[in-house]
Image (tube, rainbow, N blue to C red):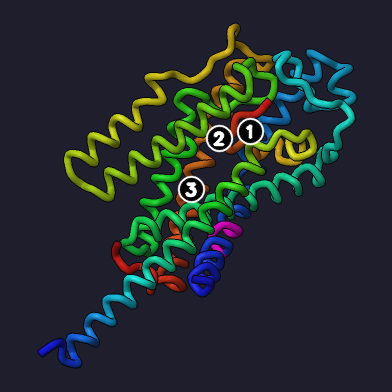
Amino acid sequence: MGMDMSQIRTATHAQAKLNSRSAALAAAMIVAVFGAVFIYGIGFAGADVLHNVAHDARHANNFPCH
Amino acid sequence: MFGYLRMFLMVALLAGITAGVVGWGLHMIGTTPLILEAETYESAAAPEAAATDRHDHAHGSDHHHDAAAWAPEDGWERNLYTLGAQLITGVGYAFLLTAGIVFFGKGADWRRGLLWGLAGFASFTLAPAFGLPPELPGTEAAPLLDRQLWWIGTVIATAAGLFAAARLRNVYGYAIAVVLIALPHIIGAPQPEVPGGLAPVELEHKFILVAVATSLAFWLVLGILTGAFFKRYAAETSVAA
């Protein structure tokens, strides 16, 4: 009755794969937030100094400028 | 999770910094000379404003810069800040690409990376450029906030549409893609009341061409490198969803 060892091993392996997938997704979510913050700061933030510093890059990368 | 985070950050930093340097090099020979040329028309139109602040462009009452705000000196200092800005742009986009590859769940190599780069170019450059083409300083434009909102909306809609088509690969996916990609253009980009600019039209057109071509090269390098580094350092996270 119940599961033999190989079945338990398979189930554990599947669970581990699932855990690692969610860990990867969580990490990717953080990376995506970093990306959004970087792009917002370089392309959109309104401060004059930021605008002046990134001016040529904003025009060249087709961020809406001025 | 922190192991993965470190992996993804390394992939994105390596790809983003390299592509950023390449993009900067292309800007130095491509777009920057055209921007500087356009500014000569601007300073001719408003000599006093140009003398105090070259960024206080003579257009749009909605947009006013504090003349006292610090700006880098023309020449190497200004170009160095452009390098910094392009590095941040490269790393920022590399973060988004890397995250996209993980969400997609099919892994990457340089070939798939090339497709990711094309998708990034289509989403972040081509789609917004249809409504809001790259602009030289001194070009008339609608209020900044309207354009920024349309730009962000267009990028998200286009990227989501491409993602759906590539992930689902069925009639629903393609239908979602068509609707999402077309929607921003049906809504229409905010346009200035009176179009025009200080620089000659030929210069404007040349700038649009050079900026779009530069961006394509930048995105291809970024995509290929992100894919290659992903395969090298993060392949084990390619577990399909």
Which residue: 86% across, 26% down? B67
Query: Callout 3: residue from which chain?
Result: B
Q: Are marks 3 and 1 in contact (CB under 8 Å)?
A: no
Q: Judge left or right: residue B56 versus residue B186.
A: right
Q: Position of residue B49 (x, y in %)?
A: 85, 19
Q: Rounded to the nearest whole Å, what is the CA distance between mark 2 and mark 1?
A: 8 Å
Determine whether B142 is above or below B52 in the image: above
Tell me the residue at 27%/50% (across/down). Answer: B167
Q: Is residue A19 magenta?
A: no
Dot in front, 2 or 3:
3
- Identified by mark 3, the residue type is Trp
**Nearer mark to the viewer, of 2 and 1:** 1
Tell me the tag on residue A59. Answer: 1
Q: Residue B82 falls in which quadrant of the image? A: top right
- At label 2, counting other C-alpha atoms closer than 10 Å, the crowd grade (few under 14, some 14-19, many 20 or more) is many
Residue type, label 1 = His
Q: Which residues are magenta?
A: B14-18
Furthest toward the left, the residue is A1
Q: Provide residue A16's location: percent of width, then percent of height.
A: 34, 77
Q: Amino acid at mark 2?
A: Ala
Chief secondary structure of the magenta span?
A: helix
Q: Which residue is mark 2?
A: B211
**Disc 2 vs disc 1: Cβ atoms closer than 8 Å?**
yes
On-image quarter of the N terminus of chain A: bottom left
Q: Up-down: is A45 above or below B8?
A: above
Q: Is residue B16 magenta?
A: yes
- Of the image marks 2 and 3, the number of the one nearer the N terminus: 2
**Residue B219: image tag:** 3
Gap between marks 2 and 3, in whole Å? 12 Å
Residue drawn at (80%, 16%) of the image:
B44
